[in-house]
Amino acid sequence: MKLPGAYKIASRSRSFEGGLHPSLRSARRVRRIVDSLRDQILGEGVESLRVRCVVRDPRELYRVELDVPALGYQRITLLDREALEQLLEHDDVRSLIRRPGPLGD
């Protein structure tokens, strides 16, 4: 018999994040997003990658657009300056980028 209030936990690794400080949880989430973007960019079928600066003040925000026409798929992600720099640390990602807007390297 199942006790009331007993629920399945979808991911054991995330279940322990509830006790962490919010800034640490946020940093781990950003790292997972950047890693996912990097893996998808370096994977097969990516036709174009564009980065545009959408907001400069009070905080720089960048729009990362990834097109995969073979799947009819477009991924758009907003990143701050630090996350964008983490993404561009990999030289293969930097070589694929097309910059229609001011990026300010």
Image: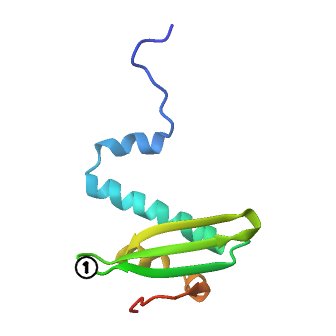
Position in image of residue 43 (x %, y %): 68, 70
Q: Nearer the viewer, residue 11 or 63?
A: 63
Position in image of residue 65 (x %, y %): 55, 73
Quarter of the rendering containing residue 36: bottom right
Total residue callouts: 1
Q: Nearer the viewer, residue 100 or 84?
A: 100
The residue shown at (35%, 61%) is 27
Say whether residue 73 is left or right of residue 80: right
As drawn, the residue found furthest toward the right would be 70
Position in image of residue 17 (x %, y %): 36, 46
Q: Considering only vertical position in the picture, is 19 above or below 89?
A: above
Position in image of residue 84 (x %, y %): 43, 77
Q: Nearer the viewer, residue 91 or 59?
A: 59
Quarter of the rendering containing residue 91: bottom right
Say whether residue 83 is left or right of residue 71: left
Residue at which label 1 appears: 57
Q: In this rendering, does residue 41 appear at all?
A: yes
Amino acid bearing label 1: Asp
Q: Considering only vertical position in the picture, is 105 above or below 65?
A: below
The residue shown at (76%, 67%) is 70
